[in-house]
Amino acid sequence: MRRYGQTLDFYPCPHPNPAVPPHPTAGFPVIMGGMDQHKITDSLNLPPGSLITLTSLQVVLWGQDLLFEGESESVPFRLILRDCRDVRWQLYAHMQVEGRPPFPPANIANFSAGRDQHRSPLRLLTDYFGLSVSYGQLIVERR
């Protein structure tokens, strides 16, 4: 069990799509978590290793529910976190996007589903933000 102040393991993480120019943070340390991206692609009946992109976020009841919309292999989906308790965001302020759109597409670089019923947090890393959230239920559904 991790406690506050405990050191986390790190490893360098390259950009998940070699066709995209390297991200300014490529090669920098990233929090290591289990690669559970297959849980999303399996739920959507997509091939393993498919690029997963988040396109928007809806915050419900001040963060009690988080509803991400995304796309993978041209398949639109929702990733829904219900009954969230502890939500921690890390925003990459150095990332600047021309025109400042509210939600530039964010590719998932690392995803660890954690365990529902607030047993261990979900950890999500994209090119724009990192998220750690303790949740009650995780739902992945096609739109």
Image (cartoon, grey):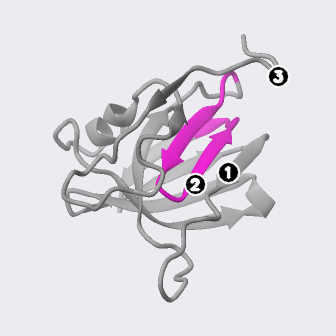
Nearer to the camera, 28 or 109: 28
Amino acid residing under circle 3: Gly
Estimate the x, y position of residue 14 in percent, counting from the top left: 34, 41
Label 2: which secondary element: strand
Q: In which quarter of the image is the N terminus?
A: top right
Cα gap from disc 3 to disc 2, whole angstroms: 21 Å
Q: In which quarter of the image is the C terminus?
A: bottom left
User: Which residue is label 3 attached to?
Assistant: 5
Which disc number belongs to residue 129? Answer: 2
- Tell whether 63 sits left or right of 67: right
Q: Which residue is drawn at 50% across and 89% down?
A: 99
Mark 3 vs mark 2: which is more N-terminal?
3
Nearer to the camera, 81 or 11: 11
Which disc number belongs to residue 60? Answer: none
- Number of residues whose C-alpha sits closer than 10 Å to that of mark 3, classed few (under 14), some (14–19) or many (20 or more): few
User: Which residue is label 1 attached to?
Assistant: 90
Q: Residue at x 53, y 42 (%)?
A: 124
- Which quadrant would residue 107 be assigned to in this image? bottom left
Specify start and end residues of the magenta stretch as a single range: 119-137
Q: Residue at x 45, y 63 (%)?
A: 69
Cα gap from disc 3 to disc 1, whole angstroms: 17 Å
Q: Look at the picture and state if 84 lies above or below 136.
A: below
Q: Which residue is drawn at 56% across and 59% down?
A: 67
Label 1: which secondary element: strand
- Number of residues whose C-alpha sits closer than 10 Å to that of mark 1, classed few (under 14), some (14–19) or many (20 or more): few
CB contact under 8 Å: marks 2 and 1: yes
Amino acid residing under circle 1: Gln
Nearer to the camera, 12 or 104: 12
